[in-house]
Amino acid sequence: MLGGHLDDMEADLSKPIVSISLGCKAVFLLGGESRQDPPIAMFLRSGDAVLMSGPARQCFHGVPRIFTDPENCDVPAFQSKFLDSSEASFVDYIKGLRININIRQVY
């Protein structure tokens, strides 16, 4: 889980952030510029990408829930892409977690 936060450490906040999700499904909350603004909830599934640019760069956001249970994790669809038995350890690893890859300009 990841509590509500701002990504505001870059020198130039006019550049977007791209966030790519792999593994278990999660709930993503996108709020406003204040913690008091009510957030919008959406599901992130494996392979989804979120682009935060413009005013969204100033919005609080977070991931309060990751679905690791077999009924809701969404990994079976992902698992079908790895048919080789040598990849079984990766599939077993990703079944219980979510990996988030962020791409941003930092200079």
Image (cartoon, helix red, strand yellow):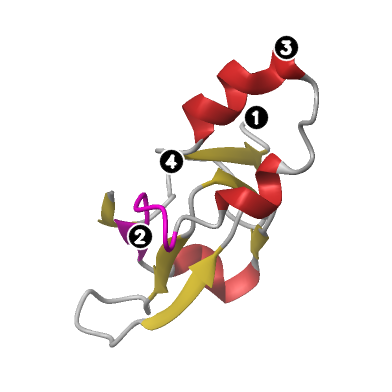
Q: Which mark is residue 30?
A: none
Residue 52: percent from left, percent from top: 61, 63
Please tell me whether mark 2 or mark 1 is closer to you in this view.
2
The answer to whether marks 4 and 3 mark residues whose Cβ atoms lie closer than 8 Å is no
Q: Is residue 18 above or below residue 50?
A: above
The answer to whether marks 1 and 4 mark residues whose Cβ atoms lie closer than 8 Å is no
Q: Nearer the viewer, residue 23 or 3?
A: 23
Disc on the earlier residue, 3 or 2: 2
Q: Let me know if residue 15 appears in the view.
A: no
Q: Is residue 94 above or below residue 67?
A: above
What whole-number distance in Å separates the C-alpha atoms at marks 4 and 3? 40 Å
Asked which secondary structure carries label 2, the reply is strand
Residue for badge 2: 62
Q: Residue at x 59, y 37 (%)?
A: 101
Residue 94: percent from left, percent from top: 52, 33
Q: Is residue 70 magenta?
A: yes
Residue 60: percent from left, percent from top: 35, 66
Disc on the earlier residue, 4 or 2: 4
Q: Amino acid at mark 4?
A: Met
What is the quadrant of residue 58 in the picture?
A: bottom left
What whole-number distance in Å separates the C-alpha atoms at marks 2 and 1? 24 Å
Q: Give the extent of the magenta segment.
A: 61-72
Residue for badge 1: 107
Q: Which mark is residue 9?
A: 4
Q: Amino acid at mark 3?
A: Ser
Q: Which mark is residue 86?
A: 3
